[in-house]
Amino acid sequence: MKRLSEAQRRYLIYRGRKVIRKRTRENAKKARLKLGSSELLYQNFLKKVSLYRDGKFEQGFSLSGALEVPEVLSFSENYNQTATFLQDVRGRLALSWKMRFHNKQKFKRAVLQTKMSGVGHYYDFTKIKNISIPVALVLASEYDCVRRDHTAVPRAVDYENWNPQVRMMLDGIGFLEMAGINSSGPAFLEGDNLRILRFRSGSEADGELVDLLLRQLGVPEALEDTAIYDAIIEALVNTRHHAYPKGLEFPRPHFPGWWLTALVDKRDRRVVISVFDRGLGIPATLVDWDRYDVFERGWRRLFQEAPNPEDTRNDGTAIRVAMAVGRSSTGQAHRGKGLPSMEAALDLCRDGSITIYSRCGAYKRAKGARAHTLNLNAPVGGTLISWDLGF
């Protein structure tokens, strides 16, 4: 056999490497084409889901599986699971907002492969059997912050399989406007003896808006006395002046304001009004009160030590002591009538209660009864004030 020259040997090595590279590219191309088939993607990588936006259903994909949701979303019936779920929602929405540019590239690749639309992770709302109006408001506030900071509107996933009552509740308060259902909706939703007011949000104590809200409730008794009006205004005033201290940065997406909604049960003649803010919480901001010295003396009588605004173990007690102080945090009339004025609405109704969740504490007082408090393990993510009034 003739021996190859050095030049021939180098040429054969070069040609062999070139053939290997060509075959590698061809095999990779075939793999990508095979990977691009919907069946293989759904089986091994993407989850097939139904997407709904602006009245149209379409088949799409999710980059990950469904996230679990508690069957009962209620602070009064299932606090720990509900609060933990809402914490997870806030964390994942914040992470999605931070990673939106990275995820955009991932979505582009998946869309090119499947020729369909998709979502990242999503919560399986089909598992929810019951959701209360206060929880629906908190949930809406989380998505509203993302909507304000990011123009993309998500699609509702497997919307047709949601529980009808849950769907009505979320649609009624306006949550579904941020999940692609409606571009805008009426001021309230009527159905099955219920009237649900679409949530409002703002950063000021808007007296005209509160007056309009009370008129839209359709309960004449609510307009005969200013107690309910004053109670709501006080909740908004406390948000404006205390929930978001100046100079303190909150993680984005963020909106330094409040959210408000209401539900009227015409059959039982009951009204539920809820106000929520995503601020530090009452126990954490008491140190800024002008009347903090009164609060501190009351605290020392209970615990024989000075209050620690960073300690969440006695947040329920902190709210109760603050309510007992009975004065505005500034002592100035134009800054509100003080936290206890929020309880005055109970004198107007035949029966009812006020509940305050703030940071890791809960305060509840029913008409004609003494207040009781709870020190909770999971934070509510701000301050939630709800009135449940019967007329």
Image: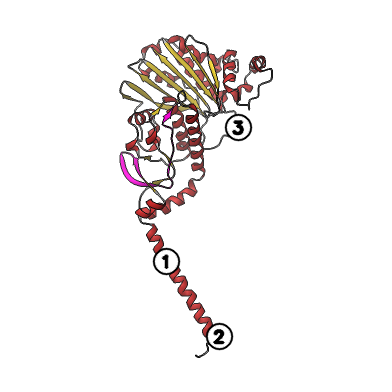
Spatial separation of the CA atoms under disc 3 and disc 2: 74 Å
Task: Count neighbours of disc 1 (C-alpha within 10 A) and say few if under 14, some if 14 to 19, many if 20 or more.
Answer: few
- Dot placed on the residue nearer the N-terminal end, 1 or 3: 1
Asked if 358 appears above or below 157 in the picture, the reply is: above
Q: Determine which quarter of the picture holds residue 377.
A: top right
Asked if 352 appears above or below 310 in the picture, the reply is: above
Location of residue 146 in the rendering, given as x and y in whole percent from the top left corner: 47, 37
- The residue closer to the viewer here, 48 or 91, is 48
Name the residue that disc number 1 marks.
27
Q: Residue most toward the front? A: 1
Secondary structure under the numbered disc 2 in the rendered image: helix
- Dot placed on the residue nearer the N-terminal end, 1 or 2: 2
Name the residue that disc number 2 marks.
6
Q: Are the residues flagged by discs 1 and 2 in contact, CB closer than 8 Å?
A: no
Question: What type is the residue that disc 3 sits on?
Answer: Leu
Asked if 222 appears above or below 53 in the picture, the reply is: above
Spatial separation of the CA atoms under disc 1 and disc 2: 32 Å
